[in-house]
Structures are given as structure tokens and as C-alpha cells.
Amino acid sequence: METYTVTVEPIGAEIECREDQTVLDACLREGIWLPHACTHGTCGTCKAQVLDGELDLGDASPYALLDSERDEGAALLCVATPRSDVTIEGEVDVEAGVEVHPVRDYTGTVVGLEDIAPTVRRVRLELDRPIPFNPGQYVQLSTPAGETRPYSLAVAPADATTIELHVKRSPDGAATEGWIFKDLAVGDAVPVSGPYGQFFLRPARDEPILMLAGGTGLAPMKAMLRHIEDLDSGHEVVLYHGVPTAADLYEHEWLQEFAAAHGWFTYRPALSQEEFEGRTGRVPAMLAEDYPRASGNVAYICGSPAFVRDTMKALMKARLFPRDIYREDFFDSADRAAGSTVVRSPLIRR
Ligand SMILES: Cc1cc2nc3c(=O)[nH]c(=O)nc-3n(C[C@H](O)[C@H](O)[C@H](O)COP(=O)(O)OP(=O)(O)OC[C@H]3O[C@@H](n4cnc5c(N)ncnc54)[C@H](O)[C@@H]3O)c2cc1C
Ligand code: FES
């Protein structure tokens, strides 16, 4: 197996990258924090210019990397692998006060599988050692078919040996219907890598927090809530959880108890198909009612790309702008095939 040298400009860092390894993976394992979100060639966040040398562009979505961009020497680093020594120009992205945790490989033993809503399964994995991460980040599971799938960590960094994931069943989904909801059993060993992603709590920001979760987009919010509790930081948090019906509300009792125990936390279920405490509607509509002006808050949005897009629009209408909004889109193969996944504004945080 060949190994090549990747030089990352403008910082001039030189790292080794195997021919079967993506450039992003090699950089994240060395603690070089390049922009990324989906890590599957879908969103375009990791796009970078190749200054010298040859990359195999891999499985880059044609929507995320246009033919014209390929012709001009751009690549999606999360799917590109080296074919020679290469030099890339990356936007090394370290925010003040944010700790960078290099990606590592772990083995997770399944210690719990629990159906917590009609289409959601809680998966608990005991890792061979603790995983350091920022609350909100995700891990990749390797499936028996040799594919990887991202899932957000739903535990606080302080509880980082036994991790918890919230997995939604996708009709005909290769990893979910084909494995996690089918053959996966307690005692199985699962390859896990991480942490990934730039969607995580910024504790240094002291504005009130709006957490806006669609479905299993609740997972990273749970990690952040637990962490805020551990920090005892005094942040005020309002969480909206959008699901179709009351039966789809999971962690409902825990969230109610958490709200009763912590004066700083407010929990608002948003049911699109039923009434809940006299209200009904999707999260963006509820936000529009509750926050005619949202400026002065910081928002974290997570869920399907459609949920994130609509919630983002509602916040921007209420005059909360991209510098105050963090987002995680749960892209899947259908989103990728539809090509509606690319966020082109560099102002929008990932
Ligand atoms: C950063 C990130 C974090 C995530 N975190 C979570 C999480 O915490 N919890 C969670 O539940 N999910 C999460 N996801 C989504 C998750 O990674 C998987 O995409 C999801 O579980 C579906 O995987 P699958 O293999 O079962 O489905 P896939 O096989 O990927 O298919 C998904 C759907 O698309 C359809 N489909 C497949 N191929 C095509 C095609 N070519 N054209 C049209 N339709 C197609 C399938 O029938 C299925 O309904 C996250 C995604 C990202 C990017
Ligand atoms: S992180 Fe590379 S395309 Fe999304």
C-alpha cells in the first residue's frame, strides 16, 4: 500500500496519507481541523483547491462538486484519496476556545438496544476506551457491508466510555432496516470512529440558547444538555422537539423531569399532526409565533435537511443571522440522490 505526503497550505503542515485513506481523514487524525460536515461527499463543506499533485476524487456528489469545479482543480477532501504527493489549500478552522479532538478508531460492544419510539432505536455501545469529543459531534459506525454511517453522540463527554445513539429507521435503509433494526444484537462488536463534525456546543457564548431538533436530531441536543448540566454554566435553554405525533416523542419523560429539575431549561414538544398542550404545528411555525424577534439568542438546529432549511428560514425571518446559528443536517442516500443537499453560502455555519 502506497503512502503519500499531503501538504496543507497555508499552514504548511505535512502529513502522511495512505492511498486508500481520504485526505480529510488523514488530517483529522493529525488534529488538523479542516471544515467538514457530512464526511460522505454530499454537502460540499470540505471543498478545497488542489495546488499540486493528483487526487482520486472518489464518490463526490456531482451536486456538491460541479464539473466546472473539478476542471478547476477542486476536490471534496472527505472522499478524495491521494495518487501522488499532493498540496492542498485548506481553510484550517480552529475557533478560539474550541478543543480539537483527533479522530481515532474504537471497538464498541453493543450493550443495549431499545425501541424508544415507533421508528427510533436507542443503541448503547461500550467502547474499548473513552472517546474525547465536544458535545454535539458524531461518530461513524462501520456496517457489516463495509459502509460507514454517521450517528450523533447522545451522551455528555463526561460519560464517554458507554455511548448512546438514537437511530431512526429508514424504509429500505441499508444500515437501519438492513442491520441496526434487523440483525444487530447485544454483544456484537462494531467498529466506531470519531469524533467528527463542527456542530457542537460553544460554551463560551453566553447568549440564551435555542435548541431546535427534528426527530432524532434530539441526540446531539441531549449531549449538549447533559454537558451544560455538568458545567453548571447558567446558560438558559429552550428546546423545541418536532415530531409528527405524541407517540413519536421520545425522551419525553426525561425531558419533562430535566425541565422540572432545572429552572434554566424549557421543553416544548412540537407535534405536526396532533395537539400538545393546546398547540399544534411544526417547529418553524411555533418559532415564528414565539419569537417574532430571535436576535440575541444563539441557535442549534439538527434534523433532516428539510427541517434544518425550514427552521433556518424561520430564524432568519426573525432576524437571527448565520453567525448565531449552528446546524447539522442528517443527510442520507435519498437526500444525496436528490442533490438538494448543498449549502452554498459560506456564511452558514456547519
Ligand atoms: C452528520 C450526520 C449525523 C447523523 N446522525 C444521525 C443520528 O444521530 N440519528 C439518525 O437516525 N440518523 C443520523 N444521520 C443519518 C444516518 O447517518 C443515515 O443516513 C440514516 O440512518 C440512513 O441510513 P441507511 O443506511 O439505513 O439508509 P440508506 O441506505 O442511506 O437510505 C436512506 C433512504 O434513502 C433511500 N435511498 C437509498 N438510495 C437511494 C437512491 N439512490 N435514491 C433515492 N432514495 C434512495 C432508502 O430507501 C432509504 O429510505 C446522520 C447523518 C449525518 C450526515
Ligand atoms: S464533508 Fe465533504 S462533502 Fe460534506
Image (spheres, rainbow, N blue to C red):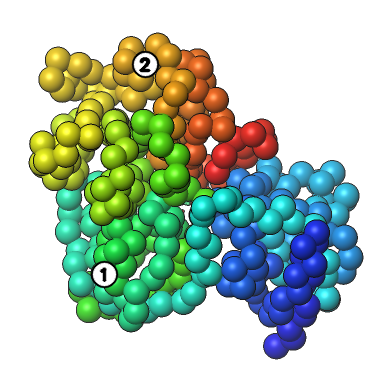
Q: Name the residue carrying label 2.
A: 291
**In the rendered view of the protein, which quadrant contains the C terminus?**
top right
Q: Residue at x 57, y 51 (%)?
A: 96
Badge 1 or badge 2: first in the primary sequence: 1
Query: In percent of the image, x 20 and y 16: which residue is there?
Result: 279
Q: Is mark 1 within 8 Å of ligand 1?
A: no
Across and down, in percent, residue 250 comes to 19, 43
- The 10 Å Cα crowd at callout 1, few under 14, some 14 to 19, many 20 or more, is some
Which residue type does callout 2 highlight? Tyr
Q: Of the residues shown, which amino acid type is indicated by label 1?
A: Thr
Rendered position, 282 above or below 251: above
Mark 1 and mark 2: span between their CA atoms?
A: 37 Å
Give the label on residue 162, or none: 1
Residue 56, by quadrant, is bottom right
Determine whether the residue tagged by mark 1 lies in a helix, strand or loop: strand
Q: Nearer the viewer, mark 1 or mark 2?
A: 2
In the rendered image, residue 295, in percent from the top left (x then y), is placed at: 46, 20
Looking at the image, do the residues carrying marks 1 and 2 touch, with CB atoms under 8 Å apart? no
- Along the line of sight, which residue is nearer the eye, 7 or 78? 7
Residue 44 seen from this side = yes
Residue 47, x across and y down, in percent: 71, 51
Disc count in the image?
2
Q: Quadrant of residue 64?
A: top right
Q: State the SS at label 2.
A: loop
Q: Check disc 2: other Cα within 10 Å, few if <14, some if 14-19, many if 20+.
A: some
From the viewer's side, name the closer residue of 308 and 322.
Answer: 322
Quadrant for the N terminus, please: bottom right
Residue 144 % position (x, y)? 41, 74
